[in-house]
Amino acid sequence: MASHSQHEHHVPSVAHYVGVFLALMVLTAATVGVASMDLGRLNTIVALSVAGFKAFLVMYIFMELRHAPSLTRLAALSGVVFLAIMLIMIGQDYGARTVLHDPPNWGKTLPIDQNAPAAAATPAPAAAPAPAH
Amino acid sequence: MATHATTPNAHSDDHHHAHPPGFAHQFEDIGQQLDSTTLGMWVFLAQEIMFFGGLFCGYSIYRSLMPAGFEAASNHLNVPLGFANTVVLIASSLTMALAVRAAMLGDNKWVLRWLVGTLILGCMFLGVKIIEYSDKFEHHLVPGYNFQWANAAEAPGAQMFYVFYFTMTGMHALHMVIGAGLLLYFIYKASKNTYHPQYFGPIENMGLYWHFVDIVWIFLFPLLYLLGYHLGKGH
């Protein structure tokens, strides 16, 4: 970080930017094309993969992470990592709440005991004896 | 160009290099200033990722709970308009990137032109959004008391889809409006020949913000508009 006196800025080439723009256009058109077909779960996987790649292109080229200092790249990456942590952990939580997938049971307290039938939605011991006031 | 006169003290000559215009004196040099402001902007954007991430997370959960209603409701969105807006927004990212490049070269005339182009494209995007929103009002697709959906089984999921549609595209549009306001400020600054090869950090940060808003749309378009596209024309 010491040699800043003659800070070398990489001035990006116009051709580079136009190329990325065209790539983003092609990928957008491809997304629409794939979405018009019914591929089941694959629809979402393809759509998110292409969108992720487009986001990477924008961040890496347009947002100049390509020439950014490591610290800046780390800050950019941290946003993505924390997003992944949030989505994965919340996804696991909701994926495990089987009762939630049964609309009549929405909002009811889950039985803690795995062996207990879900129907026995007794006022779960979640509200463990609260510390006496 | 006259040297900047923010330092009344004559000892500024003691520094081993002259202070270029736009230099803030808490920094070691202009390079450190640029790195610091860029880093700060990215930290802000990390926070923005988490903000929109929460909305995407809620969308994913409710979509997994009410898949049929979500797909049917998505199929009512106008894909050609959404596609057109995607093209417009990506084009505005290109003009924004070119504005930053012009600022790096100190070419204020082209900074101004590219920023005006970006502003026009941004306003086009918002204009299309107004057309789409008014269509939703006409067809009773705004969640709440007047929401109407023919298929009773799909209705709760469809309404929930539109809750997320309006929240997510609304927050995105709010970011666009704020971005347009910032663009006006930078257009003014560029018209005053503010930027030069040593000082272009603010324009660069404006670009980072604009590109981030573009990225949000890159995810919103497939998740909202294309989710039910395979069901055939519903519009």
Image: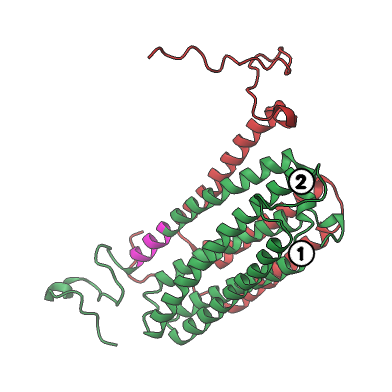
Chain colours: A red, B green
Q: Which residue is located at x 86 percent, y 61 percent?
A: B233
Quarter of the figure with residue B200: bottom left
Q: Reply above or below: A124 against B189.
A: above
Q: Reply above or below: A11 against B205.
A: below
Q: Which residue is located at x 36 percent, y 84 percent?
A: B192
Q: Name the residue under label 1.
A: B79
Give coordinates of residue B219: x percent, y percent: 66, 56
Give coordinates of residue B217: x percent, y percent: 63, 61
Q: In this view, does B140 lie to the left or right of B105?
A: right
Q: Do labels 1 and 2 share a chain?
A: yes
- Magenta-highlighted residues: B31-40
Give coordinates of residue A51: x percent, y percent: 68, 57
Mark 1 residue type: Val
Q: Name the residue under label 2.
A: B155
Within-10-Å neighbours for mark 1: few <14, some 14–19, many 20+: many
Nearest the viewer among B135 and A10 is B135
Say which chain tag 1 marks. B
